Image (cartoon, rainbow, N blue to C red):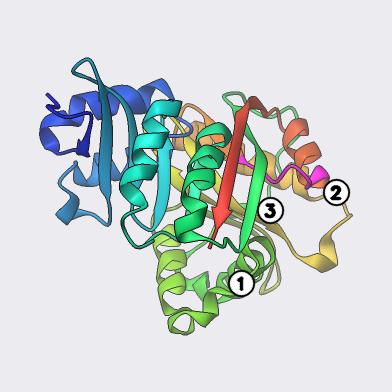
Amino acid sequence: MLTVPLRQLGENERAAVERILDADPYAGAQIAERVAAHGLNWWRSDGRIYGYDVGRRIESIIWSGAHLVPVGATPVATAAFAGLLSGEPRICSSIIGRADAVLDLWDRLSAYWGPARDVRPHQPLLVTDRIPPVPADPAVRLVRPSEVDQLFPAAVAMYTEEVGVSPMQDDSGRGYRRRIAELVKGKRAYARFDGDQVIFKAELAIITRRTTQVQGVWVHPDYRGRGIAAAAMAAVVHDALHRVAPTVSLYVNDYNTVARRVYQRCGFVSAGAFATVLF
């Protein structure tokens, strides 16, 4: 049991953390994957989990690591998390989660951690648990380990286009390439090839027992406008539902109307909104 309203959580609080994650399996997916793999002993993972207690019951949690991720964060808990974090140097590269909590956190932390490189205040969170009505593209398949070299330039192009900076500027991209290779090895990376060139790609960046989160969706610029994205995404969703998790989720920038139409055609429905603060 917590004896103070706010503190770092350990393995003794695992059941309470899992309860909160289960209450919002999409916002909490990133944390749920890490807890399942490492437990709550922070020295075994790459971050820490803090909890906010009301009446001896953990009400809200926040993951602090490479990303800052609040889950189930009430306004009073968000204020407490911000008060704790404002006294520490920023270690995260982004704040991600439900829009209300993220924007409240950033409003409180911006004086200490600002300025942000970009703030994306409304990113629709979309979910599906059904096979898409769009026929799946049979040419979309899992990337083989021998094809990482072909996939990597497409992944760099997607990251640079989406995030606004190149992953090559840190350690010449070695860490990012390892991440791509891990996704391929774990049968989480999909692509459609035209010869040796990747013309569509997507990854299952997060997998939990409740959902898998799709990230890194990208179509080669030369192939955009040809109508390949919906069938390609349908292939990803079909395989993910059959092989990986009971639901598929993702979040998308609200201004990306083309992608939002593709996801709608594939059967995704709204599950709220995310926000992202990028540093």
Q: Where is 69 relative to 161, above or below?
A: above
Q: Which labelled disc corresponds to residue 233?
A: none
Alpha-carbon distance for marks 2 and 3?
14 Å
Tag 2 residue: 227
Residue occupying the far bottom of the picture: 172
Q: Is residue 258 magenta?
A: no
Main SS category, magenta section: loop
104 and 223: which is toward the camera: 104
Callout 2–callout 3 Cβ contact below 8 Å: no
Instruction: Give the left or right position of residue 105, taking residue 87 as reference.
Output: right
In primary-sequence order, the first of circles 2 and 3 is 3
Tag 3 residue: 139
The amino acid beneath tag 1 is: Val
The amino acid beneath tag 3 is: Ala
Q: Disc 1 on helix, strand or loop?
A: loop
Instruction: Give the left or right position of residue 261, taking residue 81 as reference.
Output: right
In primary-sequence order, the first of circles 1 and 2 is 1
Alpha-carbon distance for marks 1 and 2?
28 Å
* First to last magenta residue range: 251-257
Q: Nearer the viewer, mark 1 or mark 3?
A: 1
The amino acid beneath tag 2 is: Gly
Q: Which labelled disc corresponds to residue 165?
A: 1
Q: Position of residue 160 (x, y in %)?
A: 64, 69
In primary-sequence order, the first of circles 1 and 3 is 3
